Image: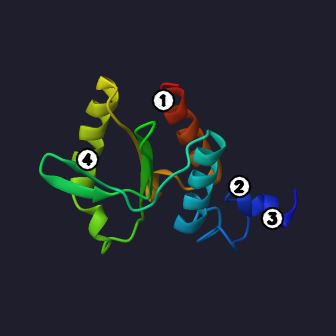
Amino acid sequence: MTYDERNDRGIGAGGPGVSSPGRLTPERARQILNARFATAGLDLVPGVTIELNGSSLVLDGYHAGRAAGYVYFGADPSDPARADIAQDFSRACADLAASGERYILFVFQEDMPTSDALERRIDAFFAGLPR
């Protein structure tokens, strides 16, 4: 395995794409997310704001035609997006997905430490996304 392959998988001794040994950086996670959505034919528009229950959330990427997108929450406790509203939005978006209205993938940095974990999460999301 080459150095770059190790970084792409989020393993190894650090470097681009890894914040500490084996940890995926937010930048690399967003690169993976954007690439996977594009491969699935979903060209994302960044910075789209959605509103639910009187609150708004800016998505990292959204495809209006398929009503699908994602938001990535970093581990920084000072990140305003890490407020309790993230959990509220996650639940509300799960309800929207169940009704077939909107599909938003919520990714929390602490839950996706490696690119392999992130890839599995993306695969599960796409498996539930209607064609």
Under mark 3, the amino acid is: Asp
Q: Which element is circle 3 on?
A: helix
Note whether residue 107 is visible: no
Pick whichever of labels 4 and 2 is earlier in the sequence: 2
Mark-to-mark CA distance, 3 and 4: 35 Å
Say which mark, if any, is on residue 9. Answer: 2
- The quadrant holding residue 17 is bottom right
Q: Are marks 2 and 3 in contact (CB under 8 Å)?
A: no
Pick whichever of labels 2 and 3 is earlier in the sequence: 3
Pick whichever of labels 3 and 1 is earlier in the sequence: 3
Q: Which element is circle 1 on?
A: loop
Q: Are marks 1 and 2 in contact (CB under 8 Å)?
A: no
Q: Which residue is mark 1?
A: 129
> As drawn, is 103 to the left or to the right of 127?
left
> As drawn, is 77 to the left or to the right of 85?
right
Q: With respect to residue 74, does 78 lie above or below?
A: below
Mark-to-mark CA distance, 4 and 2: 29 Å
Q: Which element is circle 4 on?
A: helix
Under mark 1, the amino acid is: Leu
Mark-to-mark CA distance, 4 and 1: 18 Å
Pick whichever of labels 4 and 1 is earlier in the sequence: 4
Q: Which residue is mark 4?
A: 89
- The quadrant holding residue 64 is top left
Q: Which residue is mark 3?
A: 4
> Which residue is at a point 77% across and 60% down the rendered structure image?
6
Q: Are marks 4 and 2 in contact (CB under 8 Å)?
A: no
Q: Position of residue 101 (x, y in %)?
A: 32, 31
- The quadrant holding residue 80 is bottom left
